[in-house]
Amino acid sequence: MRIVVLFVAVRLVAVGVAGIIAPDSLTELRRTYMVTPRGLYAMGTVRVAIGWLLILSASSARTPKTLRALGVLVCLQGLIQGVGGQFVGLDRARAILDWEAMHTGLLRVGALMALAAGGFVAFTVTIRPARSDSGRAPVR
């Protein structure tokens, strides 16, 4: 499971880097799945699955409580997208996306947050350093 979480983390870092360099490319990518309600629900399902994966892999991570909290946030984000999509509607969601496209600074801040979250997840699921019996890291 650690490999799958690392793959998700690397993808998140890549999205963050792409968003910082060219935020318009991510806006266009988001428009492709917001064309239909099925795409909105599919992305909500993907977010819930990623959040659940983070929660399940937290027990073997360096910072299990923080990774679980991040997983819960991602699950909530997916659930809100799935449930809230019915109330907001596609036209309003597209209007929000157009407003975001006009404010590239905000898009870059979001991309920076994605980069930080991906880096954190990659760090926390990597193997812990070996420890001696005294609980301290071995001296080399």
Image: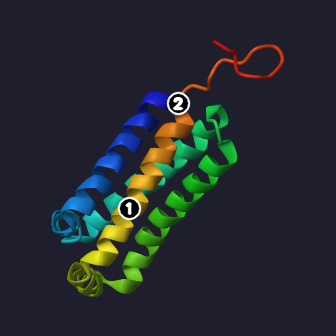
Relative to 88, residue 82 above or below:
above
Residue 56: where, in percent of width, then height?
59, 40
Residue type for callout 1: Leu
Numbered circle sitting on residue 65: none
Residue farthest toward the front in the current orientation of the protein: 140
Q: Is residue 11 left or right of residue 64?
A: left
Q: Give the residue pinned by disc 1.
A: 112
The residue nearer to you, when weighing 45 against 70, is 70
Question: Under tag 1, what secondary structure?
Answer: helix
48 on left or right of 61: left
**Image quarter of the C terminus:** top right
The mark nearer the N terminus, 2 or 1, is 1
Secondary structure of the residue carrying tag 2 is: loop
Residue at position x 26%, y 82% from top?
103
Where residue 49 appears, as percent x and y from the top left, is 46, 49
Residue 126: give its label: 2
Visible residue check, residue 69: yes
How crowded pointer 2 is (Cα within 10 Å; few <14, some 14-19, many 20+) is rated as some
